[in-house]
């Protein structure tokens, strides 16, 4: 999901200081009046900006307070989830297999996109897979209502979300996407590759030539728009994103995405490719140690930064990058994550929930999504089996409940 980093930083800060509820919304008795007044002003501004009055009224006439939007605004998995959990469910065997199928199914389109924009088609498909599971899960929030909640919450991000809301309505007014197709994330990103509305208006392309920039129903438009985004973000055709490396025992040299050096310098520091090949690539590289010096290490180049810009989190960029390598036929990481309790795939998360239900924990219907109710049940089960109470969907509690 593009261009939301500062929101996450703000939400994390507010949550930590206990000010989130005040920052997100006024007291309950003022909710309805405050929201109605705010939405009415947005509707008027949208119409002045060029939004069709009928679309503006239809989109905003029934906005109500959305607790889920408020709750989701407090946390994002890229910043709270251990990296081994994050990659376990984003780059699982199912997503790899489905991605290879998409590469075959859309081969002609993807090769045309790669030729037009110079962006590796495997990276484009990896973004598609992570953002919406190849179009199967585009989000279930009605974007105008979610954005209205965020725009009317007050605080320094209110004007940002107000602008995103008006942009979404302009997209519907132009006819690129029908109003009822504006379903997406809590923060307003939508479509098969999850563009924020202003990004959509700026960078979406009509690749299938039907006169509409439709990232919801048109696979060619969605894939080409993602490639266009990455190219504008600095993607260099033919260059790698990076690769896994090994660091010498006791390494105390520099690391971090912004601490770049030449390949010659990295070689002098004892950095070597994990696959045994010589260090290669153009330009300077940075060393990433996402789990510290005892876990997998990566040398990353400028193309990694282009991926990073799509959703400003290194864990996200690593997931996209690693998935793209798997789609090319590469294997898993050569260095194990430094944990005795690895993460679970999506299928295993679903199975964990089923086993929790069979064990008597009331978590509702098993859907593979690990929310607060499932985490609470995991903590109870961990206590029952004498495990540290983490609430994580990890391998230890999975096996304690009979999983293999």
Image: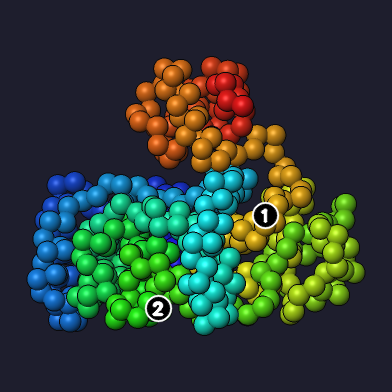
Element at label 1: loop
Residue 343 vs residue 322, the one in the foreground: 322
The image shows residue 331 at horizontal and vertical percentages of 70, 52
Residue 108 visible from this viewpoint: yes
Q: Tell whether 108 sits left or right of 57.
A: right
Q: Name the quarter where the C terminus is drawn.
A: top right
Residue 23 as seen in the image, left or right of residue 42? right
User: In the rendered view, how is the structure colored?
Assistant: rainbow
For the residue carrying disc 1, how many other residues have a C-alpha within 10 Å: few (<14), some (14-19), or many (20+)? many
**Of helix, strand and loop, which one carries label 2?**
loop
- The foreground one among 224 and 231 is 224
Label 2, on which residue? 207
Q: Nearer the viewer, residue 90 or 288?
A: 90
Work out whether mark 2 precedes mark 1 in sequence or the reverse, and give the earlier one.
2
Instruction: Give whichever of 126, 147 is nearer the camera.
Output: 126
Query: Which quarter of the rendering shows the N terminus?
Result: bottom left
The circle drawn on residue 369 is none
For the point 16% across and 63% down, the residue is 59
Left/right placement of residue 404 relative to residue 378 reads: right
Residue at the spot x=50%, y=56% of the render? 130
When asked about the image quadrant of residue 206, the answer is bottom left
Look at the image and tell me whether residue 314 can be seen. no
What's the residue at 15%, 63% (across, down)?
Answer: 60
Near mark 2 (Cα within 10 A), the count class, few <14, some 14-19 or many ≥20, is many
Residue 165 image point, x, y percent:
26, 68
Q: According to the image, label 1 marks what residue?
A: 290
**Residue 386, how many percent across, how many down?**
60, 18
Q: CA distance from mark 2 to mark 1?
A: 36 Å
């Amino acid at each position: 999901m593009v261009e939301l980093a500062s929101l996450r930083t703000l939400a994390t800060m507010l949550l930590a200081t206990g000010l989130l509820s005040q920052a997100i919304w006024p007291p309950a008795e003022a909710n309805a009046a405050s929201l109605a007044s705010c939405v009415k002003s947005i509707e008027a501004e949208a119409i002045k900006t060029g939004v069709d009055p009928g679309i503006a009224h239809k989109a905003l006439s029934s906005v109500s307070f959305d607790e889920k939007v408020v709750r989701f605004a407090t946390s994002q998995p890229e910043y709270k989830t251990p990296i081994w959990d994050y990659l376990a469910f984003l780059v699982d065997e199912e997503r790899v297999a489905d991605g290879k199928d998409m590469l075959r199914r859309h081969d002609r389109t993807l090769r045309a996109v790669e030729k037009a924009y110079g962006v590796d088609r495997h990276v484009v498909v990896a973004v598609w897979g992570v953002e919406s599971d190849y179009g199967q899960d585009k989000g279930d929030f009605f974007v105008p209502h979610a954005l209205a909640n965020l725009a009317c919450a007050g605080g320094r991000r209110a004007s940002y979300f107000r602008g995103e809301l008006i942009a979404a309505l302009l997209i519907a007014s132009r006819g690129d996407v029908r109003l009822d197709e504006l379903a997406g994330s809590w923060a307003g990103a939508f479509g098969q590759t999850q563009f924020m509305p202003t990004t959509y208006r700026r960078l979406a392309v009509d690749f299938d030539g039907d006169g509409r920039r439709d990232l919801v129903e048109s696979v060619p438009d969605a894939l080409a728009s993602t490639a266009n985004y990455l190219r504008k973000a600095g993607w260099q055709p033919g260059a790698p994103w990076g690769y896994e490396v090994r660091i010498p025992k006791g390494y105390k040299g520099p690391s971090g995405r912004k601490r770049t050096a030449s390949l010659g310098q990295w070689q002098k520091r004892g950095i070597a490719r994990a696959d045994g090949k010589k260090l290669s690539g153009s330009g300077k590289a940075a060393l990433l140690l996402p789990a510290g010096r005892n876990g997998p290490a990566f040398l990353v180049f400028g193309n990694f930064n282009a991926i990073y810009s799509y959703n400003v989190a290194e864990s996200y960029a690593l997931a996209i990058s690693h998935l793209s390598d798997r789609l090319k036929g590469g294997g898993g990481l050569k260095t194990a994550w430094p944990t005795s309790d690895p993460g679970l795939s999506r299928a295993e998360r679903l199975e964990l929930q089923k086993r929790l239900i069979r064990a008597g924990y009331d978590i509702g219907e098993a859907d593979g999504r690990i929310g607060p109710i499932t985490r609470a049940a995991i903590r109870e089960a961990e206590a029952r089996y004498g495990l540290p109470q983490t609430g994580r969907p990890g391998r230890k509690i999975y096996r304690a409940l009979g999983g293999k």
